């Protein structure tokens, strides 16, 4: 069968097993969001071919109809099915005109700043508008436009998220006043709650991912234990049936070079076996003295159709990071909290400091689709993370306001995480209406161990006013001085349903039951804690006002067990969190542009706070904090204002405060801003300059501070502007320039204490990128 050249169309993610043609056409219409017109007699007695992967609708439909003798034509958003030609048994395609299609879940190739589907909140097949929580999706197009190289870059530009550094390569992420302590990869949770997790887990490289989905608020239904902050789901790139190659090469400030190759294709003529591989390498220096970086990445994935209705996926990734001259400490402030007049290049570290990581990730999943539109998914994810850490922190010398000592520490980490997830989902009929149901189970185990120590004889005092003489000698670390292990096990079963109460009203109800166990061994002192049958509810309702707008309300919970003990040595009860939210969502322009406004209240009760003294025999003890309540507002707009203009904009106001105790009414977590505005945009110029796209991004936030009885470290509000421009030589080649912090704003990205952990934001920097796509 030969096909004529098809008009340009955006790809859609299809997953249609071989089946009776009439039902296959229904699935095609749903997934492509297109209307099919044909006489029912045409489909009688015929079966379709399986169609999977990211395809243009005409390509998908021609595969689906292969062998049936039927042909089709496309007019706008309608498909007309035609009877077999009388002079040939082959499918004959006439002129095909595609004027537009709606978006699927996959964002690669759509050139859009939004997606048609997001299932991070409940795993039910819902659009952003249908999800009764605040959702942000950073698409593949936006990742490339803004040159977002790793997860730090993505979350810095994502609505409602604040990044706080505890080292140049150790980042903590905050939403709604609380720390995010779990990452999901293709919906399978990975733990980053341990204080040292991100010293072992590599910072995710975006070359692997199609998109990053963020659901703000509590997400205990899907991921179990954690804080009521947000769920971050990194969705991997999948193989394509059509061959495609992308080669990317860039050069940037501080001798930064980055090269990557992304290859994908079917591996047999039938397209039933598909593969994809990504190889990436980055090297460079930094604006900080002594600092360097090197990142290597290999990613491979295979998909195979076992039969017409089932598929198995196997993949792996290996990431190696080298960070010579690693800065763990940041910069100190004066005793009263005022900053020293230090250059942004200042780093109170040495060339012997480093943080080197190697992460191996193996994953597998099995998907089975049934004729009644039900689906079974089984997935497993294994991470082996190792790292070697040698760095220092600064400490003030008593009685001398400009004198500090350097305190080196060395650690070697091993973090092995195993996660499994399985669920069954699909529609069911009740009271004359169709509803959706999902029932699932997931489990994860995290075995984290480290050993390390210090050099007991090491002493290096220095004067902050005389850094020209700063040249600390390399310490002799006793890596067997301290040993620590932190092992957690968590299992949970969940169930959720979306009930169609009316044509315009959807009620989502869900619940999870969890089992949790943690064992710690710190310097031979062992502790164990278990929590069984913890119930986590989920409820949401969505009311369509018309075809473009809907209102919603939701309530979600989460819990977080802890191994900390109280004054007498008894383990503290789990912290508990909840999220209340009401909002308005809308979408227009063929669902390619959307927006939302939400009011939220997030509560967290029972997090630990260190006590000054403990009962005899108790080395360290804590008290449960009073409730922290965060109230706020989310505003967001995203997608295509016109076919040539993408935008993603978000404003968040969040105000965490203590609800009881001596601190009642006072602000909590003041080192994250209360007001946060982020804007990203890209615009294709009109003819005769249609080969040029221009755009940029803006981050604007209010002040943040850390205050004690003796000092206040504060960064005033600031705005950072980034710019980009793209010139497309033709459909295969383009060159892109990115200018970050275009006006060279000098600011502290993180403020923490007066003796360390204050980190400058990046000064002005540029990247020039050449892409070749085939």
Image (tube, rainbow, N blue to C red):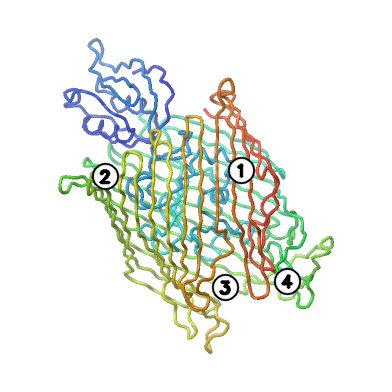
Between the C-alphas of marks 2 and 3, the distance is 58 Å
Q: Are marks 3 and 1 in contact (CB under 8 Å)?
A: no
Q: Out of 479 and 473, give the one closest to the viewer.
A: 473
Picture quarter containing residue 474?
bottom right
Local packing at callout 2 (Cα closer than 10 Å; few below 14, some 14-19, many 20+) is few
Q: Which mark is residue 281?
A: 1
In this view, the mark in front (1 or 2): 2
In the displayed structure, does residue 163 sit left or right of residue 583? right
Residue beneath label 3, please? 483
Residues at circles 1 and 4 in contact by the CB criterion of under 8 Å? no
Find residue 238 and report its horizontal and vertical position in percent: 43, 40
Residue 137, label in figure: none
- Label 4 sits on residue: 335
Of the numbered discs 1 and 4, the one sitting upstream in the chain is 1
Among numbered discs 4 and 3, the one appearing first in the sequence: 4
Q: Earlier in the sequence, mark 2 or mark 3?
A: 3
CA–CA distance between discs 3 and 1?
34 Å
Marks 4 and 3: which is nearer the front? 4
Percent coordinates x, y for residue 206 in the rendering: 53, 45
């Amino acid at each position: 069968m030969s096909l004529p050249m098809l008009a340009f169309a955006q790809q859609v993610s299809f997953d249609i097993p071989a089946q009776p043609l009439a039902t296959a056409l229904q699935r095609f219409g749903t997934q492509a969001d297109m209307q099919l017109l044909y006489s029912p007699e045409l489909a009688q007695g015929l079966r379709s071919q399986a169609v999977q992967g990211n395809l243009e609708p005409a390509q998908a439909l021609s595969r689906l109809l292969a062998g049936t003798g039927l042909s089709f034509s496309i007019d706008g958003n309608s498909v007309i099915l035609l009877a077999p030609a009388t002079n040939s048994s082959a499918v004959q395609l006439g002129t095909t005109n595609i004027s537009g299609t709606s978006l699927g879940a996959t964002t690669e190739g759509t050139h859009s700043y939004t997606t048609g589907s997001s299932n991070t909140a409940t795993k039910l097949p819902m659009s952003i508008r249908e999800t009764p929580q605040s959702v942000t999706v950073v698409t593949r197009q936006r990742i490339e436009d803004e040159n977002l190289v790793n997860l730090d870059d993505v979350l810095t530009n994502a609505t409602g998220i604040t990044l706080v550094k505890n080292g140049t390569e150790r980042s903590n992420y905050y939403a709604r006043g609380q720390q995010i302590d779990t990452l999901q990869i293709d919906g399978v949770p990975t733990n980053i709650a341990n204080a040292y997790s991100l010293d072992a887990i590599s910072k995710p490289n975006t070359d692997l991912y199609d998109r990053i989905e963020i659901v703000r608020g509590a997400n205990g239904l899907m991921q179990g234990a954690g804080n009521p902050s947000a769920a971050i789901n990194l969705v991997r790139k999948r193989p394509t049936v059509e061959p495609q190659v992308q080669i990317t090469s860039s050069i940037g400030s501080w001798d930064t070079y980055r090269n990557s190759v992304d290859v994908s294709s079917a591996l047999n003529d039938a397209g039933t076996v598909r593969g994809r591989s990504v190889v990436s390498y980055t090297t460079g220096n930094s604006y900080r003295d002594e600092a360097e970086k090197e990142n290597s990445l290999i990613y491979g994935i295979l998909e195979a159709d076992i039969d017409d209705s089932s598929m198995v996926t196997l993949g792996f990734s290996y990431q190696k990071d080298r960070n010579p001259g690693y800065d763990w400490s940041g910069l100190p402030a004066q005793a009263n909290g005022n900053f020293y007049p230090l250059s942004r290049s200042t780093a109170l570290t040495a060339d012997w400091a480093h943080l080197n990581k190697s992460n191996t990730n193996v994953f597998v999943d099995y998907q089975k689709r049934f004729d009644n539109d039900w689906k079974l998914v089984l997935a497993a994810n294994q991470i082996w993370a190792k790292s070697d850490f040698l760095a220092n922190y600064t400490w003030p010398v008593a009685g001398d306001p400009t004198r500090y000592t350097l305190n080196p520490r060395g650690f070697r980490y091993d973090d092995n995480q195993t996660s499994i997830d399985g669920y069954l989902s699909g529609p069911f009929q009740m009271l004359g209406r169709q509803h959706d149901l999902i029932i699932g189970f997931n489990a994860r185990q995290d075995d984290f161990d480290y050993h390390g120590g210090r050099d007991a004889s090491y002493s290096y005092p220095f004067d902050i006013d005389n850094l020209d003489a700063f040249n600390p000698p390399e310490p002799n670390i006793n890596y067997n001085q301290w040993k620590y292990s932190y092992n957690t096990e968590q299992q949970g079963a969940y169930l959720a349903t979306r009930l169609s109460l009316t044509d315009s009203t959807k009620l989502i109800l869900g619940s999870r039951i969890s089992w949790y166990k943690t064992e710690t061994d710190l310097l031979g002192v062992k502790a164990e804690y278990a929590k069984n049958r913890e119930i986590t509810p989920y409820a949401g309702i969505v009311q369509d006002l018309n075809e473009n707008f809907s209102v919603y309300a939701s309530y979600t919970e989460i819990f977080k067990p802890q191994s900390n003990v109280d004054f007498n040595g008894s383990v503290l009860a789990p912290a508990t969190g909840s999220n209340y939210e009401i909002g308005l969502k809308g979408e227009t322009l063929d669902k390619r542009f959307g927006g939302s406004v939400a009011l939220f209240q997030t509560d967290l009760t029972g997090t630990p706070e260190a006590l000054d003294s403990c009962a005899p025999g108790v080395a360290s003890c804590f008290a449960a904090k009073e409730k922290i309540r965060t109230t706020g507002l989310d505003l967001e707009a995203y997608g295509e204002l016109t076919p040539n203009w993408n935008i993603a904009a978000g404003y968040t106001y969040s105000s965490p405060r203590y609800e009881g105790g001596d601190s009642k009414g006072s602000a909590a977590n003041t080192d994250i801003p209360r007001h946060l505005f982020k804007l990203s945009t890209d615009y294709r110029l009109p003819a005769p300059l249609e080969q040029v796209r221009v755009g940029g991004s803006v981050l604007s936030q209010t002040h943040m501070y850390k205050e004690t009885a003796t000092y206040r470290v504060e960064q005033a509000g600031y705005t950072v502007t980034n710019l980009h421009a793209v010139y497309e030589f033709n459909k295969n080649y383009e060159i892109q320039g990115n200018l970050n912090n275009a006006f060279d704003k000098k600011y502290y990205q993180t403020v923490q204490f007066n003796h360390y952990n204050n980190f400058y934001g990046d000064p002005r920097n540029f990247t020039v990128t050449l892409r070749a796509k085939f």
